[in-house]
Image: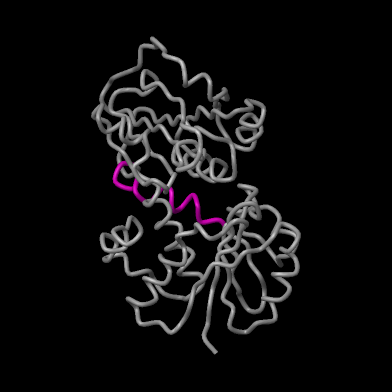
Amino acid sequence: MTPFAEVIGDPIAQSKSPRIHGFWLEKLGIDAAYRAHLVAPDGVGAYLADRRTDPDWRGCNVTMPHKQAVQPFLDTVSRTASRIGAINTVYVQQDRLIGDNTDGEGFLEPLTQWLGQTHLFRMARVLGAGGAARAITAALVDHGFTLVVAGRDAAKCETILAQLPGEHHATTLDHFADPTDFAFDDRDGLFDLVVNTTPLGMAGREPLRFDFSHVPPGSIVYDIVTSPVRTPLLIEAETRGFRTIDGLAMLIGQAAAAFRLFFGADAPREHDAELRALLES
């Protein structure tokens, strides 16, 4: 039999994970498989009970709407996943099912060159209050960021921030839709991020209403949406001269962390350009 891992969710046909993991398995010559598997919301427990008894199953990535629903069926959860309150990776360790979250690691990866520098102040404006926002805000706070988190419901943003050390701020998405005349600090040595974690701007979804008067000079604009890769937010940011990071950067980064857990090998990242071309085709 062939070892395999999966990604589960509902819906799941749109997932790019099988292409990513399949690409790496082929490059490394590993005899294993990775596939998408549709699991309905009421089928999570049965799915994990069945896979637990399969000696060839190495684990699964977890996408919406199961990132919290899987936890009662696992043997243990990592400190990272517990802190975030969401699980995006389940792997097998000595016949035990372990829940983890690699979203924060994947998100931070393309920021490494800046995170290694010393700054006078770091601030991130994070749009969204879902599971991805929870992972991203926790990762940013660990690297010294002060946060402004905006969602449709400011109370939900407050709940996220209440779990994090430091003094942060919650608001609504509408706050960033309207222009501001705020005078930003433009000293050298500041590190500002604007991060979209919402599905707004995704193909088939309503656009993200965001006014660029809210973006400090020298900011990096980061959109985790992957379809399209170049979202309207990133296109406008580029035309205004801001540095940008697209959603494939986080997707590939978090997948690499999961690949190591599933298959015991490092993803061949020297082929990232080829992989990106495949995912964008």
The residue nearer to you, when weighing 167 against 184, is 184
Q: Residue at x 44, y 44 (%)?
A: 225
The residue nearer to you, when weighing 201 against 22, is 201
Residue sticking out furthest to the top: 181
Left or right: 90 as drawn, with respect to 248 = right
Q: Residue at x 69, y 60 (%)?
A: 40
Asked if 171 appears above or below 83 in the picture, the reply is above
The residue nearer to you, when weighing 255 against 15, is 15
The quarter of the displayed image where residue 66 is located: bottom right
Return the x and y of residue 276 as percentages of the image width and height.
Answer: 31, 58
Q: Residue at x 33, y 17 (%)?
A: 185
Instruction: Give the quadrant of the N terminus.
Output: bottom right
Residue 105 in the magenta stretch? The answer is yes
Left or right: 89 as drawn, with respect to 182 = right
Residue 148 in the magenta stretch? The answer is no
The quarter of the displayed image where residue 77 is located: bottom right
Residue sticking out furthest to the front: 204
Asked if 196 appears above or below 79 in the picture, the reply is above
Asked if 228 appears above or below 75 in the picture, the reply is above
Return the x and y of residue 173 as percentages of the image width and height.
Answer: 53, 25
- Label tally: 0
Residue sticking out furthest to the bottom: 1
Return the x and y of residue 46 as percentages of the image width and height.
Answer: 75, 69
The residue nearer to you, when weighing 96 against 72, is 72
Instruction: Give the quadrant of the C terminus.
Output: bottom left
Q: Main secondary structure of the magenta part?
A: helix
Q: Residue at x 39, y 33 (%)?
A: 193
The segment highlighted magenta reads 101-114
Return the x and y of residue 25 as percentages of the image width and height.
Answer: 39, 76
